[in-house]
Image: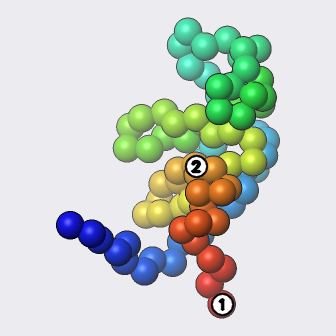
Amino acid sequence: MTYRRKKLVVEATVWNKDGDHPNVTEFKMKGVSNLSKCLDCGERMHEHGMVNLAGRAIKVCPGDVLVHEQGESYPMKPAAFELSHKVEK
Ligand SMILES: [Zn+2]
């Protein structure tokens, strides 16, 4: 089966650092040093944030686009976001 995603208008914010959005908290993950480098973006983990999504902690890289839906936020890579979203006029 092939599906087309329903048209949906969402708010989104580019996240770069702590304090950019209240849904993002300081990055803290057991067993992951804040000085180690992220496998996705290459920045150190202390430059990252976290969001809670359905009870799971999700890493937010600097420059990720946060999509806000139904009171929660989730990060997307900018290229993936641009493929699936356009500015609502
Ligand atoms: Zn990263």
**Is 49 rendered above or below residue 75?**
above
Give coordinates of residue 84: x percent, y percent: 54, 68
- Quick check: marks 1 and 2 in contact, CB under 8 Å? no
Residue 32 rendering spot, x and y as whole percentages? 61, 13
Q: Which residue is mark 1?
A: 89
To which quarter of the image does residue 80 belong? bottom right
Mark 1 element type: loop
- The answer to whether residue 36 of the structure is visible from this angle is yes
Q: Quadrant of residue 31?
A: top right
Picture quadrant of residue 45: top right
Residue receiving disc 2? 75
Q: Quadrant of the C terminus?
A: bottom right
Between 82 and 72, the one lying in front of the other is 82
- Of residues 23 and 48, the one nearer the viewer is 48
Amino acid type of the residue that numbered disc 2 sits on in the rendered structure: Pro
* 3D distance between C-alphas at marks 1 and 2: 23 Å
Image coloring type: rainbow
Q: Check the image and report above or below for 14 versus 83.
A: above
The residue under the point 67% across, 11% down is 33
Farthest residue in the bottom direction? 89
Q: Position of residue 25 (x, y in %)?
A: 64, 37
As helix, strand or loop, the secondary structure at mark 2 comes to strand
Can I make out residue 21 in this image? no
Mark 1 or mark 2, earlier in chain: 2
Classify mark 1: residues with Cα within 10 Å, few (<14), some (14-19) or many (20+). Answer: few
Q: Residues within 10 Å of mark 2 (few under 14, many from 20)?
A: many
Observer-nearest residue: 79 or 50? 79
Q: Position of residue 63 (x, y in %)?
A: 75, 48
Quarter of the image with the N terminus is: bottom left
